Image (cartoon, rainbow, N blue to C red):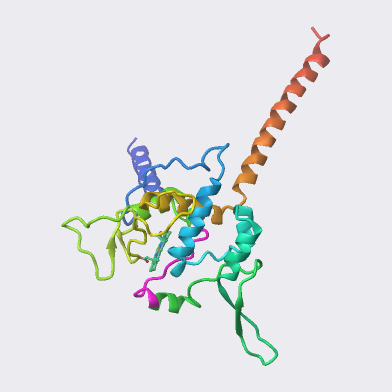
Amino acid sequence: MKALAKILALAVVASLAASPAFAAGGHEPEKHDWSFNGILGSYDKPALRRGYQVYMEVCSFCHGVEFIAFRNLIDMGLTEDEAKAAAEAVQIEDGPDDQGLMFMRAGRLSDRIPPPFPNENAARAANGGALPPDLSLMTKARPFGPDYVYALLTGYEQAPDDVEIAPGMNYNPFYSGEQIAMFEPLFDGAVFFEDGTEATIEQMAEDITQFLMWTAEPKLDDRKRMGLGVMIFLVILTGMFIAVKRRVWADVH
Ligand code: HEC
């Protein structure tokens, strides 16, 4: 009996240790009602466009989205002309030319969105030693994914009196360890949305999270549509099987 109790206690401890609540602290984020949740969920196209804008105008100075090329933005909902203009607005290093030299040229649709720093050391040097991680897979890489990113961006607050903040750090209860080197990146009116949406911190956080969900899973809409199609097909197929079975066994008593 005692041994059983011990095993049970161990199992409880093990399951707690394995749960996504962060070992080093970090509050569990609230569940957000995302448009892409559930089997019928899909991306909110206007939100994606706004999120891309927030990324380019705020986050892209420190964070890359390394897997995304400008042509992918057309799948996301930009027109081809808009995606081309977005590409042409950035300078890309190319080369070597006939003289063996690297040169800068305007971006093309086939180029990836360039990272803000040429390498990790440069990124750390510009951020007081901290590394701003690539964001393209962030919503898949962290427990609670999009809910965590949203909570982190909207969760900055004054540190409680009993918490001592290290130099260069900011208090954020949703970050593991509750101190983060990134200062609060969003403030009301940080960008201007052309569709008339008011750029509050919550709105921008929601839109950039939607965009980062898309960078991590650009095919989510297709996948869900296909899943639904497969389910409908299976229901019809099952119905047909039942009908056939009834027919075949009808005369057997
Ligand atoms: C001035 C530079 C800077 C800007 C601008 C910035 N960040 Fe960061 N960010 C950082 C640094 C540095 C870290 C690493 C923090 C650490 O190690 O404590 C970070 C970390 C993060 C993390 C990682 C949390 C984790 O779990 O590892 C996320 C998510 C994030 N930033 C999102 C954003 C978003 C979204 C924006 C734009 C709205 C943004 N950041 C703008 C510098 C920046």
Q: Is residue 62 above or below residue 196?
A: below
* Residue 231, visible in the rendered structure: yes
Residue most extreme to the left:
161
Residue 22 seen in the figure:
no
Quadrant that contains the N terminus: top left
| Quadrant showing the C terminus | top right
Q: Is residue 131 magenta?
A: yes
User: Quadrant of residue 224 in the image?
Assistant: top right
Residue 161 is left or right of residue 184, and the answer is: left
Q: Residue furthest top?
A: 253
Percent position of residue 211, x then y: 51, 54
Residue reaching furthest to the bottom: 99
* Relative side of 137 to 239, left or right: left
Figure label count? 0
Q: Is residue 212 left or right of residue 124?
A: right
Q: Is residue 16 above or below residue 187?
A: above
The span picked out in magenta is 126-137
Q: Nearer the viewer, residue 25 or 212?
A: 212
At a point 55% along the width and 39% down the height, the residue shown is 41
Q: Position of residue 78 (x, y in %)?
A: 60, 55
213 above or below 230? below
Which residue is nearer to you in this view: 39 or 10? 39
Identify the main secondary structure in magenta: loop
Q: Residue at x 46, y 51 (%)?
A: 207
Q: Residue at x 48, y 72 (%)?
A: 116
From this view, report whether residue 36 is shown above or below residue 101. above
Residue 21 % position (x, y)? 37, 49
| Ligand 1 quadrant in view | bottom left
Q: Where does the image place residue 102, in percent across and percent down from the top left?
A: 61, 86
Identify which residue is drawn at 52% across, 60% down.
136
